[in-house]
Amino acid sequence: MVKVRDSKQSPSGEDASKGDSLDQSRNLDLQIKTGQKAPPEGPSKPEGPPNPLGLARDAYTNSTRFLDSSLRVQWERNERAFQSRHPTGSKYLSPDYRTRSRIFRPKTRSMIRSGEAQAAASYFSNETVVDVKPWNDEDEAQQIAAKIYGYLLQYRLTSPSQKHGIPWFQTLVGAVQDAQKYGVVISKQWWEYEERAEEEYYTEQDPDTGQSIVDEDGEPAVSKETTNTIVRDRPHIDLYPPELVRIDRAADWRDPINSSPFCILINSMYLYEVREKIDKGEWLDVNDAQLKLATTEQIWDTTRAQREGYREDSKESDTTINDFTHIFVHENFMRWGGREWVWYTAGTSQLLSNPLPLEEIYHHCKNGERPVVMGSILIESHKVYPAGKPQLIQTLQSETNDIANLRIDNIKLAISKRYLAKRGRNIDLRSLTRVVPGAITLVTDINEDIKEMESRDVTSSSFQEQNLLNLDIDDVAGIFSQGTVQANRRMNETVGGMQMLSGAANLVAELDLRTFTETWVEPVLRQVINMERAYETDRTLIALAASKARVWKEFTVNSITREMMDQELLVRVNVGIGATDPKQRLEKFAMATKVVSDLLGERLSTIINAEEVVAEVFGPAGYRDGRRFFNFDGPDPMVKQLMEELKKLQQELESKKMDNETKMQVAELSAKARIMQQLVENKGAMDVTRLRVQGQSSQAQEKSRSEQQSQAAGAQAAFGQEALKGLYQITMAGMKDTDKDDGKSERTES
């Protein structure tokens, strides 16, 4: 279903804080499940390659001829070996072996499952396997983009949400399985966006009165509002079986997809899905009869039949529901005129869309790089399609089956022997062949009628040969099985011998993982990063990524802009030596850390990344997220200790300052007390003088009032002079005491 998303409009329910400037120059255009862009309105002008249907048909026919003659038979044999079934045409499938032992020892299945287990242990030991780094460590914009995209990629790969997340575990393990079985794994990366229109009904109300508005019939007026809800908004990775991909046989073996002049992806779609695209104008008008005609071209595929085993063909259009009929739609990538073009056809008989430039459909594809990645787990130089692992042990697997079946037949003959019966004698043959304990067989002559055939027991030698074959299989496959340990009785008795046995197997397994990482995992993740750069408009998710990456704390930025996000970054997957053996990996990490610690000394504590160290240590121990045991968001213990010491020193300084201030206050209070005491004493003396004057003879009372006032004024003046003199002496004494205390404090502080 085609949905339009305007990059300038914020999706419903999203927070635009610290991310408003990201969307202002984005344009997502029209996106559909296969990445097809709707053609412009009006009559479309033919562009690109002439006769696109004929070119697509010729490319498909030539590549299919090579695939059928050179690859399909081996793929089917590998598939049958993976399912522990004998190959087509094997003697064990003939009627002559109907009563013989026909087991298939599951060495191939064990080898592939061991590879899957090693991949799961290496890629999912912790949640920080994928690392996004800037090309230029000095560029702040690249540093910000690397941190944000690193969190976004981690969120996409680990989120269980069908709206935002990628089922990365199933996808990666399935890719490892395809690469081991067929020699190659092929995937397509595209952005899945889908909206669903939802209708809401509400009653209309008068804005002035708040009363419900009624219609002509007196019923409340009802209005309808249509809103779009986002159902899918995520990057998508689709795995394609190798028989559904066509490339040129002469492509470069190092990059087959992009070096081939064409690449055809065969998609199985339901009839109603194709009709929806036609009705919406995304594809050309083709009727149902013409679409069903394209289905008959690929209604039967032998490789798919072998993969599904004894089940009915899942793509066979035997259904009574016409809309659920399977239609095989080809997505054709072709280089023409120095430019990459894309168009769709129904099989090779009907054209569904006109050719369009690749970058107009897949916005994340730059410089003509196709949204398809082809990886491998083995490197075979100058071969576009390298061999799968079952092909490496094909003859050894066959010999292992023969020895096991012959040994079982020998054991059966040793237990249930064969007999020679004389012709024409009256012998109870039915009783003789039943081999029932306690049964009686009637004969005429006991000595002449029946003769027992002796079968030599050769199980001991067969087991020795079986062990040698197991060792050869383990060496080629790069696995360390219990059979290998039991066969090397002398070496498995010591720890050093066990390490020698597992060391060679681990080297081969690590080479396989490194090849798979370089050819498929990292190219796919780089395309996911490019899709995030081209299509991501969820501002809430981007703001959350910036917050989790501590962008606001580590960098002086207030918003995330497009210029910051449009940066070329380096995507690496941390799967190295020792990845397949958790104990060995942890020991090597501890040894490397000890060497670095001895070289750097105390400087190591200032430059080490504690979070990454914890993740690397707890990952091999079986904990995906060992960081949950630590609080890295809290304050640094060393910084906390220094802050406590600084606080203690500040308290000591404050206490010394308080002591000096207290002494000054005491001195000031003492001076005030002395002044008050002097005032009281002076006032008492003045009162005594006044009483003496009043007790004199009556002659003094007759003096004039002016003389008395002059005497009182003189006494008050004398009192004032004495008071000022005392206050001055007390103040000077206090200042001398303060200077002495300050001198002592300065000597104490120094």
Image (spheres, rainbow, N blue to C red):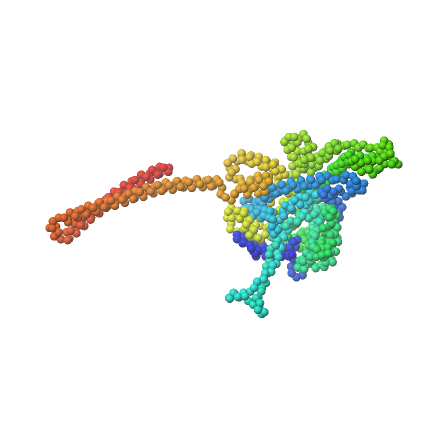
Instruction: State which quarter of the image contains the C terminus.
Output: top left
The x and y percentages for residue 313 are 73, 50
Residue name at image x 45 percent, y 41 percent: 643
Instruction: Give left or right: position of 543 versus 443.
Output: left
Q: 67 or 52: nearer the eye?
A: 67
The x and y percentages for residue 532 are 60, 50
Residue 723 seen in the current view: no
Residue 541 seen in the current view: yes
Q: 99 or 472: nearer the eye?
A: 99
User: What is the residue that sits farthest to the top in this orientation?
Assistant: 490
Q: How many marks?
A: 0
User: What is the residue that sits farthest to the right in this orientation?
Assistant: 424
The x and y percentages for residue 328 are 71, 53
Residue name at image x 56 percent, y 64 percent: 203
Residue name at image x 30 percent, y 42 percent: 667
Instruction: Give left or right: position of 100 versus 184.
Output: right
Instruction: Give left or right: position of 417 versus 486.
Output: right
Residue name at image x 57 percent, y 40 percent: 618
Q: 717 or 467: nearer the eye?
A: 467
Using the rendered view, name the quadrant where residue 20 is placed: bottom right
Instruction: Give left or right: position of 84 versus 218.
Output: right
The x and y percentages for residue 95 are 80, 42
Instruction: State which quarter of the image contains the N terminus.
Output: bottom right
